[in-house]
Amino acid sequence: MAFHRAHGRLMVEAVPLSDIADRFGTPCYVYSRARLEANWHAYDAAFGTRAHRIHYAVKANGNLALLNLLARLGSGFDIVSGGELARVLAAGARGADLVFSGVGKSRNELKDALLAGVGCINVESAAELSRLAGIAAELGVEAPVAFRINPDVDPGTHPYISTGLEQNKFGIPMRDAPALYRQAAELPGIKVKGIACHIGSQLTDLSPIADTVAGVLALAAELEAMGITLEHLDLGGGLGIRYRDEEPPAHADYVRVLSAIPERYEIHIEPGRSIVGDAGVLLTRVEYLKQTPTRHFAICDAAMTELIRPALYEAWHGVELLEAPAASAVAACYDLVGPVCESADFLAHERELSLTPGACLALMNAGAYGFVMASNYNTRPRPPEVLVDGDTLHEIRPRERLTDLFGTERQLP
Ligand SMILES: *Cc1c(COP(=O)(O)O)cnc(C)c1O
């Protein structure tokens, strides 16, 4: 267990989280190396000897240290921007181990991806295909391509993280795919490699995934009949994790559904949240307790600037005290809020807790879409990130300094 209690103290691996809060201050993100690696291995082991590639979705958490650890395990990476391309290359990934996703890739991003020798570009429109073919011709290279199709499947998740419905901006409608594949197969500079899709995030039900597999296989059969051969089928990411009482499928059960795909295709997946989500927590300290006529507020030093998921998706994160409550603690049903000047600035609503000012808390399962979505709103420096490996602490990103925030701004003469 990466996060567990020992003698009343909340631990990450062999280290009490309160020691980390004391040493690095709060707010602070903390990750477990063991949990991260176990999650990756769970996918890899579930595939067994079946040909597969795991492309970790960098947007879930792109810290160089985490990327480098995954690269050492043999992971590939799913990137969605030129920035992420530069980041994974800096972390030691090879171009061939990358898949480039995203609905709005710029000319420069496509060019840089081709120059880096990316393994596959998941194209999302006819316009992107012609842009890519032009750039490949200019560079005199062949662009490896899959089309991201939109299977029009309801993933049964929050609308902001659903991507495979007809009304979403993502992918190519199934019925348009064959014509596009035919066009791509005839274009010089384009090499068709596979089919891609990604229907959404925090999926807790296998049936939309099974429907997606069936849709992709039907398209693959149609393309093969047209004489277009495919090397891989990419089912995207999206497997959910347990934040509260969800019961997401185990990695192995998810992989079993994908294994309906015939052996002649390499299976590709792009998991993000299910690799890093439960490997991280956000530490925060209570600054003030404030009682109003209707609410008990715990005003914390972390805010929507550190963890925006509650404000953005009404996401639920578990809240744990790092130490047993002090004798003077006040038991109540608290709203945990931050100092930011927005009423959307909350971390958790209506939690039964015994708190004192100064108490330290962990927001659980904050490893994915946590730090990466942090902002400097209200001129708040972004927090440090600490990676724990057994009993060893690594500060993998220091707390931002105020000079990092406005040091490059220029006043008029
Ligand atoms: C966000 C995203 C992923 C990862 O999704 P998770 O829910 O974090 O697993 C994978 N592929 C694409 C194309 C994405 O946009």
Image: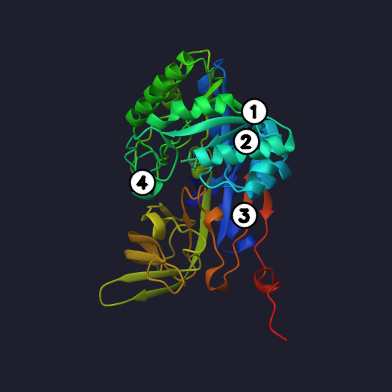
Q: Nearer the viewer, residue 29 or 156?
A: 156
Query: SS at mark 1?
Result: loop
Circle 3: residue type? Glu
Q: Establish if 233 lies above or below 383.
A: above
Viewport quadrant of the C terminus? bottom right
Is residue 391 among what the camera can see? Answer: no
Which is closer to the viewer, label 1 or label 4? 1
Question: Horizontal and vertical percent for residue 209?
Answer: 38, 29
**Neighbour tally class for label 4: few under 14, some 14-19, many 20 plus, Cα within 10 Å:** few
Identify the mark nearer the N-term, 2 or 4. 2
Question: How many angstroms separate mark 3 from mark 2 (CA)?
Answer: 40 Å
Query: SS at mark 3?
Result: strand
Q: Are marks 2 and 1 in contact (CB under 8 Å)?
A: yes
Q: Which residue is mark 1?
A: 188
Question: How many angstroms separate mark 2 from mark 1 (CA)?
Answer: 7 Å
Which image quarter: residue 401? bottom right
Question: Horizontal and vertical percent for residue 137?
Answer: 69, 35
Q: Which residue is mark 2?
A: 133
